[in-house]
Image (cartoon, rainbow, N blue to C red):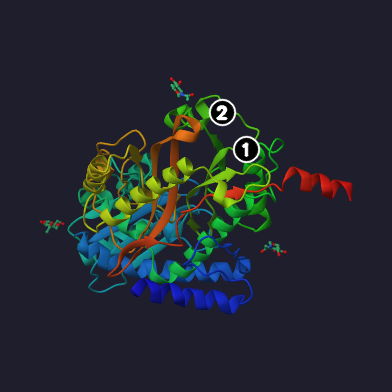
Amino acid sequence: MRLLCRLSLMWAVAASASPANAPSPLTWPHLPKYFTLPSLNEQAEIQDAWTKERLNSIPALMRRHNVSAWLISQREYTEDIVFWSLKKATQFSARRQTTDLFLADPKSTEAHHAWISNTADQDLWPELRAILDSEQPETIAINADTGVSFASGLHAGELEAVREGLGEKWSEKLVSVPPMLPIEVIGTMVESKGLWYWKLMSTAWAMISEAFSERVIEPGVTTTTDVEWWLREKLQQMNYTTWFQPSVTIIDGDTKWFAQGVEETTKPRETIMYGDMLHVDFGVTALGMNTDTQHLAYVLYPGETEDDVPAGLTEGLKKGNRVQDIVRENMKVGATGNEILKKCIEQMDAGGISGRVYSHPVGDWGHSAGTPIGFTNLQEGVPVTGDLPLIANTFYSVELAVWHFVPERNATLLFPLEEDVRFDDGWGFNWVYGRQTKFHVIKTPKRNSLQAQGDL
Ligand SMILES: *[C@@H]1O[C@H](CO)[C@@H](O)[C@H](O)[C@H]1NC(C)=O
Ligand SMILES: *[C@@H]1O[C@H](CO)[C@@H](O)[C@H](O)[C@H]1NC(C)=O
Ligand SMILES: *[C@@H]1O[C@H](CO)[C@@H](O)[C@H](O)[C@H]1NC(C)=O
Protein backbone atom coordinates (compact mmCIF):
# COMPACT_ATOMS: atom_id res chain seq x y z
CA MET A 1 0.00 0.00 0.00
CA ARG A 2 2.72 2.38 1.01
CA LEU A 3 4.56 1.66 -2.19
CA LEU A 4 1.50 2.41 -4.25
CA CYS A 5 1.05 5.73 -2.47
CA ARG A 6 4.64 6.68 -3.08
CA LEU A 7 4.58 5.69 -6.72
CA SER A 8 1.30 7.44 -7.37
CA LEU A 9 2.80 10.57 -5.81
CA MET A 10 5.73 10.33 -8.21
CA TRP A 11 3.35 9.65 -11.01
CA ALA A 12 1.42 12.78 -10.11
CA VAL A 13 4.60 14.85 -10.18
CA ALA A 14 5.68 13.33 -13.47
CA ALA A 15 2.23 13.76 -14.93
CA SER A 16 2.07 17.41 -14.00
CA ALA A 17 5.35 17.97 -15.81
CA SER A 18 4.12 16.39 -19.01
CA PRO A 19 0.54 15.14 -18.86
CA ALA A 20 0.37 13.94 -22.44
CA ASN A 21 2.94 11.17 -22.43
CA ALA A 22 4.00 10.50 -18.83
CA PRO A 23 4.14 6.74 -18.25
CA SER A 24 2.41 4.79 -15.55
CA PRO A 25 5.23 3.19 -13.56
CA LEU A 26 2.97 0.30 -12.58
CA THR A 27 2.46 -1.35 -15.94
CA TRP A 28 4.79 -2.87 -18.45
CA PRO A 29 5.16 -2.84 -21.36
CA HIS A 30 4.79 0.87 -21.91
CA LEU A 31 7.05 3.50 -23.29
CA PRO A 32 9.24 4.80 -20.48
CA LYS A 33 9.64 8.56 -20.48
CA TYR A 34 12.82 10.53 -21.05
CA PHE A 35 13.48 13.14 -18.38
CA THR A 36 15.60 16.16 -19.30
CA LEU A 37 17.86 17.56 -16.62
CA PRO A 38 17.35 21.02 -15.09
CA SER A 39 19.88 23.79 -15.83
CA LEU A 40 23.37 23.22 -14.42
CA ASN A 41 22.76 25.91 -11.84
CA GLU A 42 19.55 24.22 -10.66
CA GLN A 43 21.26 20.82 -10.63
CA ALA A 44 23.93 22.24 -8.34
CA GLU A 45 21.27 23.58 -5.97
CA ILE A 46 19.47 20.23 -5.89
CA GLN A 47 22.69 18.32 -5.22
CA ASP A 48 23.92 20.74 -2.57
CA ALA A 49 20.63 20.41 -0.67
CA TRP A 50 21.09 16.62 -0.65
CA THR A 51 24.71 16.99 0.48
CA LYS A 52 23.67 19.32 3.29
CA GLU A 53 21.27 16.67 4.61
CA ARG A 54 24.08 14.15 4.44
CA LEU A 55 26.54 16.43 6.26
CA ASN A 56 23.95 17.04 8.98
CA SER A 57 23.53 13.29 9.47
CA ILE A 58 27.22 12.68 10.21
CA PRO A 59 27.40 13.40 13.98
CA ALA A 60 24.54 10.97 14.71
CA LEU A 61 26.16 8.30 12.54
CA MET A 62 29.46 8.86 14.38
CA ARG A 63 27.71 8.36 17.73
CA ARG A 64 26.11 5.17 16.42
CA HIS A 65 29.56 3.85 15.45
CA ASN A 66 31.27 5.12 18.59
CA VAL A 67 33.54 7.52 16.76
CA SER A 68 34.17 10.75 18.68
CA ALA A 69 36.34 12.53 16.07
CA TRP A 70 36.76 11.81 12.35
CA LEU A 71 39.54 13.42 10.34
CA ILE A 72 39.54 13.46 6.52
CA SER A 73 42.52 15.09 4.84
CA GLN A 74 43.81 15.26 1.27
CA ARG A 75 45.62 17.32 -1.36
CA GLU A 76 44.35 18.50 -4.73
CA TYR A 77 43.87 15.45 -7.03
CA THR A 78 44.63 12.88 -4.31
CA GLU A 79 41.18 13.00 -2.73
CA ASP A 80 39.91 10.63 -0.09
CA ILE A 81 36.94 8.71 -1.53
CA VAL A 82 34.65 10.25 1.12
CA PHE A 83 35.48 13.72 -0.27
CA TRP A 84 33.39 13.02 -3.39
CA SER A 85 30.27 12.41 -1.32
CA LEU A 86 30.62 15.57 0.78
CA LYS A 87 31.82 18.15 -1.74
CA LYS A 88 29.78 21.00 -3.16
CA ALA A 89 28.50 20.55 -6.71
CA THR A 90 30.81 23.35 -7.85
CA GLN A 91 33.92 21.72 -6.36
CA PHE A 92 35.74 19.68 -8.99
CA SER A 93 38.60 18.54 -6.77
CA ALA A 94 40.14 19.22 -3.39
CA ARG A 95 42.33 22.34 -3.27
CA ARG A 96 45.77 22.60 -1.68
CA GLN A 97 45.43 20.74 1.61
CA THR A 98 41.72 20.20 2.22
CA THR A 99 40.93 18.91 5.71
CA ASP A 100 37.67 18.19 7.50
CA LEU A 101 37.21 17.40 11.18
CA PHE A 102 33.88 16.01 12.39
CA LEU A 103 33.00 15.78 16.09
CA ALA A 104 30.23 13.48 17.31
CA ASP A 105 29.36 15.42 20.42
CA PRO A 106 31.11 18.79 20.53
CA LYS A 107 30.99 20.56 23.91
CA SER A 108 31.96 24.07 22.92
CA THR A 109 32.35 24.20 19.16
CA GLU A 110 30.80 23.21 15.82
CA ALA A 111 30.46 19.55 14.79
CA HIS A 112 32.14 20.21 11.44
CA HIS A 113 35.35 22.16 10.80
CA ALA A 114 36.88 22.55 7.34
CA TRP A 115 40.17 24.01 6.15
CA ILE A 116 41.64 24.70 2.72
CA SER A 117 45.22 25.64 3.39
CA ASN A 118 48.62 25.97 1.81
CA THR A 119 50.19 27.33 4.97
CA ALA A 120 49.11 24.42 7.15
CA ASP A 121 51.76 25.02 9.81
CA GLN A 122 50.29 28.45 10.48
CA ASP A 123 46.56 27.80 10.36
CA LEU A 124 45.30 24.24 9.81
CA TRP A 125 47.31 22.31 12.39
CA PRO A 126 47.44 24.87 15.23
CA GLU A 127 43.68 25.44 14.89
CA LEU A 128 42.94 21.72 14.67
CA ARG A 129 45.12 20.92 17.71
CA ALA A 130 43.40 23.67 19.69
CA ILE A 131 39.98 22.13 18.95
CA LEU A 132 41.23 18.68 19.97
CA ASP A 133 42.79 20.10 23.17
CA SER A 134 39.49 21.66 24.15
CA GLU A 135 37.22 18.77 23.06
CA GLN A 136 39.49 15.91 24.22
CA PRO A 137 38.14 13.15 21.92
CA GLU A 138 39.16 9.65 23.06
CA THR A 139 40.27 8.69 19.58
CA ILE A 140 40.56 10.25 16.11
CA ALA A 141 39.30 8.06 13.30
CA ILE A 142 41.04 8.19 9.91
CA ASN A 143 40.16 6.37 6.69
CA ALA A 144 42.88 3.75 6.82
CA ASP A 145 40.99 0.45 6.74
CA THR A 146 42.82 -2.39 5.00
CA GLY A 147 39.82 -4.23 3.55
CA VAL A 148 37.07 -1.77 2.58
CA SER A 149 37.87 0.78 -0.12
CA PHE A 150 35.25 3.29 1.06
CA ALA A 151 37.00 3.35 4.46
CA SER A 152 40.56 3.50 3.15
CA GLY A 153 40.82 6.74 1.18
CA LEU A 154 43.59 8.41 3.22
CA HIS A 155 46.71 8.55 1.06
CA ALA A 156 49.95 7.19 2.52
CA GLY A 157 51.83 10.48 2.20
CA GLU A 158 48.93 12.43 3.68
CA LEU A 159 48.90 10.12 6.71
CA GLU A 160 52.51 11.14 7.41
CA ALA A 161 51.53 14.80 7.02
CA VAL A 162 48.60 14.28 9.43
CA ARG A 163 50.91 12.67 12.01
CA GLU A 164 53.35 15.56 11.78
CA GLY A 165 50.59 18.14 11.94
CA LEU A 166 48.88 16.56 14.95
CA GLY A 167 52.09 16.08 16.92
CA GLU A 168 52.93 13.08 19.06
CA LYS A 169 50.19 13.52 21.63
CA TRP A 170 47.26 13.43 19.19
CA SER A 171 48.90 11.06 16.69
CA GLU A 172 48.77 8.39 19.37
CA LYS A 173 44.99 8.68 19.30
CA LEU A 174 44.68 7.88 15.60
CA VAL A 175 42.59 4.77 14.88
CA SER A 176 41.24 3.28 11.69
CA VAL A 177 37.61 4.26 11.09
CA PRO A 178 34.96 1.54 11.60
CA PRO A 179 34.12 0.81 7.93
CA MET A 180 30.40 1.12 8.53
CA LEU A 181 30.73 4.87 9.23
CA PRO A 182 31.90 5.91 5.73
CA ILE A 183 29.69 3.19 4.24
CA GLU A 184 26.62 4.69 5.90
CA VAL A 185 27.65 8.22 4.98
CA ILE A 186 28.15 7.33 1.30
CA GLY A 187 25.50 4.61 1.02
CA THR A 188 22.56 6.33 2.72
CA MET A 189 20.31 7.97 0.16
CA VAL A 190 18.34 10.85 1.64
CA GLU A 191 14.59 10.58 1.06
CA SER A 192 14.51 13.53 -1.33
CA LYS A 193 16.76 11.72 -3.85
CA GLY A 194 14.05 9.15 -4.55
CA LEU A 195 12.07 11.09 -7.14
CA TRP A 196 15.13 12.00 -9.19
CA TYR A 197 16.45 8.47 -8.96
CA TRP A 198 13.16 7.26 -10.41
CA LYS A 199 13.48 9.83 -13.23
CA LEU A 200 17.03 8.68 -14.02
CA MET A 201 15.81 5.10 -14.07
CA SER A 202 12.89 5.99 -16.35
CA THR A 203 15.38 7.68 -18.68
CA ALA A 204 17.68 4.64 -18.63
CA TRP A 205 14.70 2.43 -19.54
CA ALA A 206 13.67 4.86 -22.27
CA MET A 207 17.16 4.72 -23.78
CA ILE A 208 17.23 0.91 -23.66
CA SER A 209 13.71 0.69 -25.12
CA GLU A 210 14.68 2.93 -28.02
CA ALA A 211 18.04 1.21 -28.58
CA PHE A 212 16.30 -2.18 -28.62
CA SER A 213 13.80 -1.20 -31.29
CA GLU A 214 13.55 -1.01 -35.07
CA ARG A 215 14.38 2.70 -34.75
CA VAL A 216 18.00 1.73 -34.04
CA ILE A 217 18.43 -1.91 -35.12
CA GLU A 218 18.19 -3.11 -38.72
CA PRO A 219 18.79 -6.88 -38.74
CA GLY A 220 21.63 -7.93 -41.02
CA VAL A 221 23.13 -4.43 -40.92
CA THR A 222 23.39 -3.06 -37.36
CA THR A 223 26.14 -4.44 -35.12
CA THR A 224 26.15 -4.72 -31.35
CA THR A 225 28.93 -2.09 -31.30
CA ASP A 226 26.68 0.29 -33.28
CA VAL A 227 24.05 -0.04 -30.55
CA GLU A 228 26.63 0.57 -27.81
CA TRP A 229 27.73 3.82 -29.47
CA TRP A 230 24.12 4.80 -30.15
CA LEU A 231 23.57 4.64 -26.37
CA ARG A 232 26.68 6.76 -25.73
CA GLU A 233 25.51 9.37 -28.25
CA LYS A 234 22.01 9.37 -26.75
CA LEU A 235 23.46 10.02 -23.29
CA GLN A 236 25.41 12.93 -24.73
CA GLN A 237 22.34 14.37 -26.47
CA MET A 238 20.40 14.17 -23.21
CA ASN A 239 23.28 15.79 -21.28
CA TYR A 240 23.69 12.67 -19.16
CA THR A 241 26.92 10.72 -18.76
CA THR A 242 27.68 7.19 -17.68
CA TRP A 243 30.09 5.29 -15.48
CA PHE A 244 30.90 2.43 -17.91
CA GLN A 245 30.86 1.76 -21.62
CA PRO A 246 27.47 0.22 -22.49
CA SER A 247 27.76 -3.39 -23.52
CA VAL A 248 25.46 -5.11 -26.03
CA THR A 249 25.85 -8.83 -26.67
CA ILE A 250 24.16 -11.46 -28.82
CA ILE A 251 23.42 -14.30 -26.45
CA ASP A 252 24.03 -17.74 -27.88
CA GLY A 253 25.21 -20.97 -26.28
CA ASP A 254 28.72 -19.58 -25.80
CA THR A 255 28.96 -17.96 -22.38
CA LYS A 256 32.74 -17.49 -22.21
CA TRP A 257 32.16 -13.73 -22.38
CA PHE A 258 30.21 -13.99 -19.11
CA ALA A 259 32.84 -16.00 -17.26
CA GLN A 260 35.82 -13.99 -18.41
CA GLY A 261 34.44 -10.55 -19.20
CA VAL A 262 33.68 -9.42 -22.72
CA GLU A 263 37.03 -7.72 -23.21
CA GLU A 264 39.07 -10.84 -22.64
CA THR A 265 37.45 -13.13 -25.18
CA THR A 266 36.65 -12.87 -28.83
CA LYS A 267 33.25 -11.27 -28.78
CA PRO A 268 30.45 -13.38 -30.21
CA ARG A 269 29.16 -12.50 -33.68
CA GLU A 270 28.51 -8.79 -33.92
CA THR A 271 25.98 -8.29 -36.71
CA ILE A 272 22.46 -8.55 -35.34
CA MET A 273 20.27 -11.06 -37.19
CA TYR A 274 16.62 -12.16 -37.08
CA GLY A 275 15.98 -14.54 -34.20
CA ASP A 276 18.82 -13.19 -32.02
CA MET A 277 18.47 -12.75 -28.30
CA LEU A 278 20.22 -9.51 -27.27
CA HIS A 279 21.49 -8.37 -23.91
CA VAL A 280 22.44 -4.88 -22.73
CA ASP A 281 24.28 -3.73 -19.63
CA PHE A 282 23.73 0.01 -19.31
CA GLY A 283 23.89 2.75 -16.66
CA VAL A 284 23.27 6.48 -16.62
CA THR A 285 24.95 9.12 -14.47
CA ALA A 286 23.45 12.48 -13.52
CA LEU A 287 23.04 14.64 -10.41
CA GLY A 288 25.78 12.66 -8.66
CA MET A 289 23.85 9.40 -8.95
CA ASN A 290 24.38 6.28 -11.07
CA THR A 291 22.04 3.57 -12.33
CA ASP A 292 22.74 0.00 -13.49
CA THR A 293 20.33 -1.98 -15.69
CA GLN A 294 20.49 -5.16 -17.80
CA HIS A 295 17.69 -6.05 -20.18
CA LEU A 296 17.04 -8.64 -22.90
CA ALA A 297 15.61 -8.21 -26.38
CA TYR A 298 14.50 -10.48 -29.20
CA VAL A 299 14.79 -9.77 -32.93
CA LEU A 300 11.53 -10.85 -34.56
CA TYR A 301 11.51 -12.31 -38.06
CA PRO A 302 9.69 -10.16 -40.64
CA GLY A 303 5.99 -10.00 -39.95
CA GLU A 304 6.25 -11.59 -36.48
CA THR A 305 4.68 -10.00 -33.41
CA GLU A 306 5.52 -10.00 -29.70
CA ASP A 307 3.58 -13.26 -29.40
CA ASP A 308 6.19 -14.95 -31.58
CA VAL A 309 9.06 -14.68 -29.08
CA PRO A 310 10.06 -18.35 -28.61
CA ALA A 311 8.46 -19.81 -25.47
CA GLY A 312 11.84 -21.16 -24.31
CA LEU A 313 13.23 -17.63 -24.16
CA THR A 314 10.20 -16.30 -22.30
CA GLU A 315 10.59 -19.15 -19.80
CA GLY A 316 14.24 -18.18 -19.26
CA LEU A 317 13.27 -14.59 -18.57
CA LYS A 318 10.59 -15.77 -16.11
CA LYS A 319 13.17 -17.90 -14.33
CA GLY A 320 15.34 -14.80 -14.00
CA ASN A 321 12.33 -12.92 -12.59
CA ARG A 322 11.92 -15.64 -9.94
CA VAL A 323 15.52 -15.17 -8.83
CA GLN A 324 14.98 -11.39 -8.79
CA ASP A 325 12.11 -11.98 -6.33
CA ILE A 326 14.29 -14.31 -4.24
CA VAL A 327 17.08 -11.73 -3.96
CA ARG A 328 14.79 -8.78 -3.29
CA GLU A 329 12.82 -10.64 -0.62
CA ASN A 330 15.96 -11.82 1.16
CA MET A 331 17.39 -8.32 1.38
CA LYS A 332 16.77 -7.74 5.08
CA VAL A 333 18.37 -4.76 6.77
CA GLY A 334 20.99 -5.93 9.27
CA ALA A 335 21.67 -9.26 7.52
CA THR A 336 25.12 -9.50 5.91
CA GLY A 337 25.55 -9.77 2.16
CA ASN A 338 26.91 -13.29 2.64
CA GLU A 339 23.90 -14.37 4.75
CA ILE A 340 21.56 -13.03 2.06
CA LEU A 341 23.58 -14.74 -0.67
CA LYS A 342 23.45 -18.08 1.16
CA LYS A 343 19.65 -17.90 1.47
CA CYS A 344 19.32 -17.00 -2.21
CA ILE A 345 21.51 -19.90 -3.32
CA GLU A 346 19.60 -22.32 -1.06
CA GLN A 347 16.27 -21.20 -2.52
CA MET A 348 17.60 -21.41 -6.06
CA ASP A 349 18.92 -24.92 -5.40
CA ALA A 350 15.59 -25.94 -3.86
CA GLY A 351 13.79 -24.60 -6.93
CA GLY A 352 16.18 -26.39 -9.29
CA ILE A 353 17.44 -23.07 -10.67
CA SER A 354 20.98 -22.82 -11.90
CA GLY A 355 22.33 -19.28 -11.82
CA ARG A 356 24.49 -16.74 -10.08
CA VAL A 357 23.76 -13.75 -7.85
CA TYR A 358 26.07 -10.73 -7.82
CA SER A 359 24.03 -7.78 -6.55
CA HIS A 360 25.58 -4.58 -5.24
CA PRO A 361 24.87 -1.13 -3.78
CA VAL A 362 24.44 1.66 -6.34
CA GLY A 363 24.19 5.41 -5.84
CA ASP A 364 27.09 7.84 -5.52
CA TRP A 365 29.10 5.17 -7.38
CA GLY A 366 28.02 2.51 -9.83
CA HIS A 367 29.36 -0.08 -7.41
CA SER A 368 28.68 1.94 -4.29
CA ALA A 369 29.27 1.63 -0.56
CA GLY A 370 27.69 -1.31 1.23
CA THR A 371 27.76 -5.07 1.42
CA PRO A 372 27.83 -6.95 -1.90
CA ILE A 373 25.52 -9.94 -2.37
CA GLY A 374 27.83 -12.31 -4.25
CA PHE A 375 30.27 -11.71 -7.09
CA THR A 376 30.06 -13.53 -10.45
CA ASN A 377 32.96 -15.75 -9.33
CA LEU A 378 32.16 -15.79 -5.58
CA GLN A 379 28.95 -17.69 -4.90
CA GLU A 380 29.96 -18.98 -1.47
CA GLY A 381 30.60 -15.61 0.09
CA VAL A 382 32.58 -12.44 -0.54
CA PRO A 383 35.53 -11.91 1.83
CA VAL A 384 35.47 -8.87 4.16
CA THR A 385 32.78 -6.67 2.57
CA GLY A 386 30.35 -9.60 2.28
CA ASP A 387 30.35 -9.87 6.08
CA LEU A 388 29.11 -6.30 6.58
CA PRO A 389 25.42 -5.67 7.36
CA LEU A 390 22.94 -4.38 4.80
CA ILE A 391 21.92 -0.80 5.64
CA ALA A 392 18.49 0.83 5.31
CA ASN A 393 17.69 3.86 3.15
CA THR A 394 19.96 2.83 0.33
CA PHE A 395 19.78 1.81 -3.34
CA TYR A 396 20.87 -1.57 -4.66
CA SER A 397 21.25 -3.13 -8.04
CA VAL A 398 19.72 -6.62 -8.08
CA GLU A 399 22.09 -8.25 -10.55
CA LEU A 400 22.03 -11.93 -11.45
CA ALA A 401 21.93 -14.51 -14.22
CA VAL A 402 20.20 -17.85 -14.73
CA TRP A 403 20.88 -20.66 -17.17
CA HIS A 404 17.91 -22.10 -18.97
CA PHE A 405 17.62 -24.81 -21.60
CA VAL A 406 15.85 -23.38 -24.65
CA PRO A 407 14.36 -26.25 -26.71
CA GLU A 408 13.95 -24.04 -29.80
CA ARG A 409 17.73 -23.55 -29.79
CA ASN A 410 18.67 -26.97 -28.42
CA ALA A 411 21.00 -25.03 -26.13
CA THR A 412 21.31 -23.78 -22.58
CA LEU A 413 21.38 -20.00 -22.67
CA LEU A 414 22.37 -17.45 -20.06
CA PHE A 415 19.74 -14.88 -19.01
CA PRO A 416 21.46 -11.98 -17.19
CA LEU A 417 19.14 -9.40 -15.63
CA GLU A 418 19.65 -6.31 -13.52
CA GLU A 419 17.27 -3.80 -11.95
CA ASP A 420 17.74 -1.21 -9.22
CA VAL A 421 15.80 -1.26 -5.96
CA ARG A 422 15.40 1.32 -3.22
CA PHE A 423 14.58 0.90 0.43
CA ASP A 424 11.10 1.96 1.52
CA ASP A 425 10.57 2.18 5.27
CA GLY A 426 8.13 -0.47 6.44
CA TRP A 427 8.09 -2.13 3.05
CA GLY A 428 11.65 -3.25 2.37
CA PHE A 429 13.46 -3.06 -0.95
CA ASN A 430 11.38 -2.39 -4.05
CA TRP A 431 12.00 -1.80 -7.73
CA VAL A 432 12.80 1.86 -8.31
CA TYR A 433 11.11 1.88 -11.69
CA GLY A 434 9.96 -1.65 -12.39
CA ARG A 435 11.59 -4.74 -13.78
CA GLN A 436 11.64 -6.39 -17.13
CA THR A 437 9.09 -9.18 -17.51
CA LYS A 438 8.74 -9.12 -21.32
CA PHE A 439 11.34 -9.00 -24.06
CA HIS A 440 12.02 -5.78 -25.86
CA VAL A 441 11.29 -6.68 -29.50
CA ILE A 442 12.80 -5.43 -32.73
CA LYS A 443 10.10 -5.59 -35.42
CA THR A 444 10.42 -5.76 -39.18
CA PRO A 445 7.37 -5.49 -41.43
CA LYS A 446 6.60 -8.55 -43.59
CA ARG A 447 8.91 -8.75 -46.60
CA ASN A 448 6.13 -8.33 -49.18
CA SER A 449 4.85 -5.25 -47.38
CA LEU A 450 8.41 -3.86 -47.45
CA GLN A 451 8.57 -4.54 -51.17
CA ALA A 452 5.17 -2.98 -51.58
CA GLN A 453 6.48 0.13 -49.83
CA GLY A 454 9.54 0.09 -52.10
CA ASP A 455 7.33 -0.17 -55.18
CA LEU A 456 5.31 2.85 -54.25
C1 LIG B 1 33.80 3.23 22.26
O1 LIG B 1 35.14 3.70 22.01
C2 LIG B 1 35.92 3.88 23.19
C3 LIG B 1 37.22 4.44 22.75
O2 LIG B 1 37.01 5.59 21.99
C4 LIG B 1 36.05 2.58 23.94
O3 LIG B 1 36.74 2.81 25.12
C5 LIG B 1 34.67 1.98 24.20
O4 LIG B 1 34.82 0.70 24.75
C6 LIG B 1 33.86 1.91 22.94
N1 LIG B 1 32.50 1.47 23.22
C7 LIG B 1 31.86 0.58 22.47
C8 LIG B 1 30.46 0.27 22.93
O5 LIG B 1 32.37 0.03 21.52
C1 LIG C 1 21.54 19.82 -23.32
O1 LIG C 1 22.26 20.99 -23.01
C2 LIG C 1 22.22 21.99 -24.01
C3 LIG C 1 23.16 23.10 -23.59
O2 LIG C 1 22.78 23.60 -22.35
C4 LIG C 1 20.79 22.46 -24.19
O3 LIG C 1 20.72 23.42 -25.22
C5 LIG C 1 19.92 21.27 -24.57
O4 LIG C 1 18.58 21.66 -24.63
C6 LIG C 1 20.08 20.16 -23.53
N1 LIG C 1 19.37 18.99 -24.02
C7 LIG C 1 18.51 18.30 -23.27
C8 LIG C 1 17.86 17.13 -23.91
O5 LIG C 1 18.29 18.58 -22.09
C1 LIG D 1 20.97 -31.13 -29.48
O1 LIG D 1 22.31 -30.95 -29.05
C2 LIG D 1 22.93 -32.13 -28.65
C3 LIG D 1 24.31 -31.83 -28.09
O2 LIG D 1 24.55 -30.50 -27.95
C4 LIG D 1 23.02 -33.09 -29.80
O3 LIG D 1 23.61 -34.30 -29.39
C5 LIG D 1 21.65 -33.34 -30.37
O4 LIG D 1 21.72 -34.10 -31.53
C6 LIG D 1 20.94 -32.04 -30.68
N1 LIG D 1 19.55 -32.30 -31.07
C7 LIG D 1 19.02 -31.84 -32.16
C8 LIG D 1 17.58 -32.18 -32.41
O5 LIG D 1 19.65 -31.13 -32.97
* Mark 2 crowdedness (10 Å alpha carbons): few <14, some 14-19, many ≥20: some
Q: Amino acid at mark 1?
A: Thr
Label 1: state its secondary structure.
Answer: helix
- Front residue of this view, candidates 102 and 330: 330
* Mark 1 crowdedness (10 Å alpha carbons): few <14, some 14-19, many ≥20: many
Q: Is residue 67 above or below residue 273?
A: below
- Front residue of this view, candidates 42 and 358: 358
Q: Is residue 299 above or below residue 120?
A: above
* Left or right side of 106 for 314: right
* Left or right side of 207 for 365: left
Residue 224 is labelled as: 1
Q: Is residue 133 above or below residue 97?
A: below
* Residue 386 location, quadrant: top left
**Could you tell me if the residues under marks 2 and 1 are in contact, i.e. CB atoms within 8 Å?**
yes
- Residue 399 visible in the snapshot: no
- Front residue of this view, candidates 288 and 305: 305
Task: Report the image quarter containing ligand 3.
Answer: top left
The CA distance from mark 2 to mark 1 is: 10 Å
Q: Residue at x 85, y 46 (%)?
A: 454
Indicate if the residue with disc 2 has its beta carbon within 8 Å of ligand 3.
Answer: no
* Left or right side of 356 for 21: right
Give percent across and percent down for residue 31.
Answer: 59, 62
- Front residue of this view, candidates 55 and 191: 191
Residue 132 is labelled as: none
Q: Give the labeled residue for mark 2.
A: 267
Quadrant including the N terminus: bottom left
Q: Residue at x 43, y 53 (%)?
A: 419
Label 2: state its secondary structure.
Answer: loop
Give percent across and percent down for residue 152.
Answer: 33, 45
Give percent across and percent down for residue 153.
Answer: 37, 46
